[in-house]
């Protein structure tokens, strides 16, 4: 993976932390896809979103519902066309005030130096407990 792709991913994380969807979207192709491994009964925003617009709309809804106070990717590990990072995050469910402190795995697929896919993997037991508290 070229250094430029790594720099792009670092910029994407900076935009994510800033909740700046215009900036983040400037790095995504029209056919970008984003998946989250969370069951739909725990979070209606989970599953697969195909397309840049669908991805950005989902992130806007996430930003509206969850106040991310910390988002820090660990070292990016490169495997062919994939970049993998363990991402430490701390966020507050806005309507309940419940906090989630977790480390999720991000798997990026890169084509021609640009991200074309992001798959997010959460600790499902931890996320279920978080959402259970948030719904009380």
Image (cartoon, grey):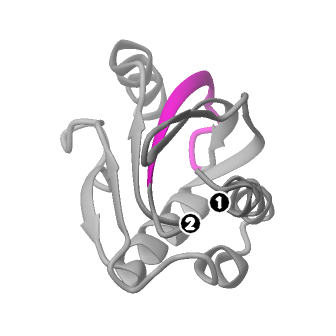
Residue nearest the viewer, comparing 126 with 122: 122
Residue at 80% x, 58% y: name it. Answer: 14
Residue 113's disc number: 2
| 122 horizontally vs 92: left or right | left
Q: Quadrant of the C terminus?
A: top left
Residue nearest the viewer, comparing 135 with 41: 41
Could you give the CA–CA distance between mark 2 and mark 1, rounded to whole angstroms? 5 Å
**Do the numbered discs 2 and 1 sit on residues whose CB atoms are within 8 Å?**
yes
Residue nearest the viewer, comparing 64 with 96: 64
**Crowdedness near tag 2: few (<14), some (14–19) or many (≥20) residues, C-alpha within 10 Å:** some
Q: Is mark 2 on a helix, strand or loop?
A: loop
Task: Note whether 116 is above or below 93 in the view shown.
Answer: below
The residue wearing badge 1 is: 5
Residue 74 lies, in percent from the top left, at 72, 28
| 53 horizontally vs 26: left or right | left
Q: What element carries label 1?
A: helix
Magenta residue span = 95-109
Q: Is the magenta stretch mostly helix, strand or loop?
A: strand
Residue at 52% x, 28% y: name it. Answer: 104
Asked if the stretch drawn in magenta spans residue 105, the answer is yes
Residue 68's disc number: none
Which tag, 2 or 1, sits closer to the chain's start? Answer: 1
């Amino acid at each position: 993976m070229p250094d430029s792709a790594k720099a792009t991913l670092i910029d994407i994380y900076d935009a994510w932390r800033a909740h700046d969807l215009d900036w983040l979207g400037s790095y995504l192709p029209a056919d970008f896809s984003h998946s989250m491994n969370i069951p739909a009964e725990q979070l209606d925003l989970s599953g697969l979103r195909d397309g840049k617009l669908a991805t950005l709309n989902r992130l806007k809804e996430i930003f509206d519902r969850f106040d991310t106070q910390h988002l820090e990717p660990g070292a990016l590990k490169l495997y062919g066309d994939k970049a993998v990072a363990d991402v430490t995050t701390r966020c507050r469910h806005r309507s309940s005030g419940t906090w989630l402190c977790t480390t999720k795995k991000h798997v990026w697929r890169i084509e021609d130096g640009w991200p074309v896919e992001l798959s997010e993997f959460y600790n499902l037991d931890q996320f279920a407990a978080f959402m259970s508290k948030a719904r009380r």
